[in-house]
Image (cartoon, rainbow, N blue to C red):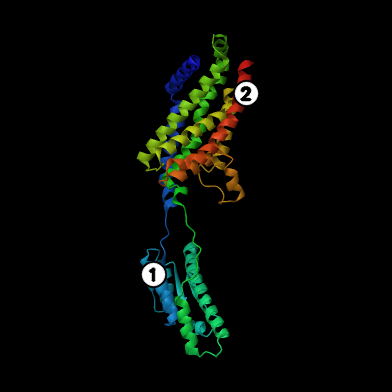
Amino acid sequence: MRAAWLITVKDLKLRLRDRSAIVIGIVAPLALAVIFDLVFGPGFDATLDLDYGVVDQDRSQVSAAMVETLNSLEDAGVLTITSYPDPAGAEAAIEAGEIQAFILLPTGLGEAVFSQQPATIDVVGDIDFPTSTQIAASIASQFGEGVAAAQLSVATAAALSPEHPSPDQLAAWGAAAATLRPAFAMTDLSAETRQLDAATYLAAGMAVFFLFFTVQFGVAGILDEERQGTMARLLAAPIHRSSVITGKAILSFALGVISMTVLVVASRLLTGARWGHPLGVALLVMTGVLAATAIMGVVAAVAKTPEGAGNLGAIIAVILGMLGGTFFPVGREGDLLDRLSYLTPHAWFLRGLGDISGGAPWTAALPAAGAILLFAVVFGLLAWVLLWRKVQT
């Protein structure tokens, strides 16, 4: 084991002296993370400014309920609402850029609702703000579904009533039905611990992407030894052949851990990245470096020259990085591309960070770390066998 450590120390000094590992492992990913955060960060974390108008031409109980709903959303900070006396004024506000859309409550809305007739609520939006217009349409549609439910309740009550109810009684039933809360509601709750903010996502993505280039300086050193003729001297020395492979693997692991640690600290200070519990981050970093070392060990074993290893390693690193979502999320949750992304340690690394970055305990990273460790074991065994054969020849 002493021979392996001596090989590691010797190679580490060489890599730090030529500074290539520092540039690839620290400078490049940190610089790109900062640049991407400045360019794309606001887009990641941007929120919609919803400025809507409302035109109440009906002045009925139904239209008043719609206006009250919009005002409650404004009070909750979801949107801002402005009342206009007529559609022309609201359209002028859209043209002036004051609002993105307005909801028109036409005359006869309340009468149609209370008489069990079809009713219409119009939404007029700016063509340049399709998302905001769609949200306004969704709000109107949700309100319309509530009105339809109240109509159905009144119609059911009227059909079951032994006496024919008067219009005033139907109106009273409708008003009472409108005040009832639904028996249950389906709500989409987003888990905060599964979401990475822009700064953390970009920093983590660049870190794990360049990690595969960084660890290659270690295991690919076997090819450099062969080219320089020093491999024969190492094998002729009174050391076990496994010490050569072990020394190179330890170097890869050391370079990966050093670069990842520096990137975690630097991105926290420069971009405000929130990595989560230190123990969870350390676990993900350790397993991530092991997986990267194992995969690049296979590359070094099958390549014939250092250049070939560099080219093949770059291709694999880029493919895995893109599929793993290091630059941007790939696919939608549950679709084929999303499932394929978990064939990479990159996706598991980002998922693990998402599990702990929101304040969850470090143990939340264990499932992702276990998946990454599986990559390390499978490819590590394969790399060891192939490199052992390479050193023997």
Hey, which quadrant is residue 32 in on the image? top left
**Which residue is nearer to you in this view: 208 or 55?**
208
Front residue (pair 237, 271): 237
Residue occupied by mark 1: 72
Q: Quadrant of residue 273?
A: top left
Q: Residues within 10 Å of mark 1 (few under 14, many from 20)?
A: some
Give the CA distance from mark 1 to mark 2. 67 Å
Report which residue position mark 2 lands on: 385
The reply to whether callout 1 and callout 2 are in contact (CB within 8 Å) is no
- Locate the C terminus and report the quarter of the image it occupies: top right
Inspect the image, locate mark 2, and give the three-letter code of the amino acid beneath it.
Val
Q: Measured along the vertical axis of the image, is residue 189 above or below residue 350?
A: below
Which of marks 2 and 1 precedes in the sequence? Answer: 1
Q: Amino acid at mark 1?
A: Ser
Question: Is 311 situated above or below 103?
Answer: above
Q: Is residue 272 visible?
A: yes
Under circle 2, the secondary element is helix
User: Residue 95 location in percent, x, y?
Assistant: 43, 69
